[in-house]
Amino acid sequence: MKIQATDIPTAQWSGDCLALGFFAIEPESVTLDLELDQHLGGLLKELIQETNFKGKVGETQSVRLASGTPRQLILVGLGESTLLSLDTLRQAAAAVARIARKQRCQTVGLQLPPWNQETASSAQAISEGIELALHQDHRFKSEPDLDSAAFPSQIELLGLGHQTAALERAQQVCSGVILARELVAAPANIVTPVTLADTATELAQTYNLSLEILEREDCENLGMGAFLGVAQASDLPPKFIHLTYKPSGVPRRKLAIIGKGLTFDSGGLNLKVSGSGIETMKMDMGGSAAAFGAAKVIGQIQPDVEVHFIVAATENMISGHAMRPGDILTASNGKTIEVNNTDAEGRLTLADALVFAEKLGVEAIVDLATLTGACIVALGDDIAGLWSSEDQLAQALTQAAELAGEKFWKMPLEEKYFEGLKSPVADMKNTGPRSGGSITAALFLKQFVKDTAWAHLDVAGPVWADKESGYINAGGTGFGVRTLVNWALS
Ligand code: BES
Ligand code: MN
Ligand code: ZN
């Protein structure tokens, strides 16, 4: 599928399917492109009136024309013009792409107004919406559904003729989102700590990034007892992955992105029971998928910032040498942790990753983790939690997320709740009480950052989708990649 931009007047465009965006309209006072309406034999006006099309966000109407070109007409609502956002454009483009595929249209002309007169970012968002909506993952089917993948083959963005650079940017961004989706969607017998390291190696080779992979012994030498405690029961070797993008000149700033990389979370000896979500715990590496997705994009864009991508990859398994509830682990900063619940494993792996990241002398560290079910209880499936002790960093991330169309909600680092993590025998426990579970998890992580600006993103809900919606398809969503890229470039 090819996306192009053109300045051909809409009335002169020819192809299978013409799609038009409309702001919220009063049916009595429709303002239309009269030349276009005439070209369509007055059908546009009739369709709007007969279907009572109001141009609400998400509203679509489509109709088969008698003959000739276009043969399919799609109207897509954009809501109030003053409330238009980049994500409304992304969603509208996705809705059109899905209808065009269903109607087996080969060529599509899509006309949408730019957001905020920013034609470049609008063209990028529209293109992202199309690309991500049409992405299909047939890797694990013996007979792929090639038929639906064939439609549409070409989409032209009308009125955006000079935006080829923006379309290329969209392509780069989507390649990262799709990498993250496919890493999350792949089962735990396919994406393992070893293959995650292979993915990093491939990224390093393709985009000229530097790569350091610490084996178990290297981690032992660094005193990463928290990470290794989690890795203890797996038959697969743990891999501590450190991928770095360095610009050719002096970097404007240096950043670190850490992704939780549990390729499977059984819960350990505090085994997850059936129905507790153990069936979907292949997605417990969603944070690392976002980090690698962002690395893929940043490796292509080559900005003037240095970015470190860090993933402590392992599985949380059971065996005769599994870490036991009650075991005390020592992290690489010397702090001791009483493991009162082996299922709170993500924070143990992140503890050593945070200590490692801080030693790199970066200006800011952001970690992404499918850390707690409690965060899903608090914010639902679509919104990630954001914790940060630095308002400026929280704001930069919020702005990056807004442009990305990814939802975050700022949560409190309520120091008093750390009382719930006090241990009589060690410096802290890894698990607090049930209430405020996502907050105590964030407070736990905070113990492993001394004085670097740090933010924690709990992405347990949004990295996975049970059903398709907008440009999101069922399965791995690639959540986080676009926010990370926007943040790194800001
Ligand atoms: N990976 C899970 C969190 C999770 C739950 C992610 C559901 C996605 C969907 C994490 O390792 C975990 O098991 N957390 C426990 C923590 C508890 C033991 C303090 C949880 O949330 O139940
Ligand atoms: Mn767990
Ligand atoms: Zn987990």
Image: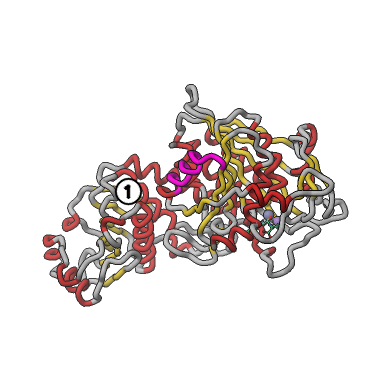
Three-letter amino acid code at disc 1? Answer: Ser
Secondary structure, mark 1, is: helix
Image coordinates of residue 256 in percent, x first then y, are 57, 36
Q: In the displayed structure, would residue 190 be above or below residue 250?
A: below
Badge 1: residue crowd in 10 Å (few <14, some 14–19, many ≥20): many
Highlighted magenta segment, given as a residue range: 389-401
Colour setting:
secondary structure
Q: Residue at x 54, y 60 (%)?
A: 379
Looking at the image, residue 178 sits to the left or right of residue 311; the answer is left
Q: Nearer the viewer, residue 167 or 250?
A: 250
Image coordinates of residue 377 in percent, x first then y, are 59, 63
Residue 91 visible in the current orientation = yes
Q: Main secondary structure of the magenta part?
A: helix
Q: In the displayed structure, would residue 135 be above or below residue 390?
A: below
Image coordinates of residue 45 in percent, x first then y, are 17, 70
State which quarter of the image contains the C terminus.
top left
Q: Residue at x 42, y 49 (%)?
A: 402
Q: Is residue 394 magenta?
A: yes
Residue 296 visible in the current orientation = no
Q: In the displayed structure, would residue 258 be above or below residue 136?
A: above
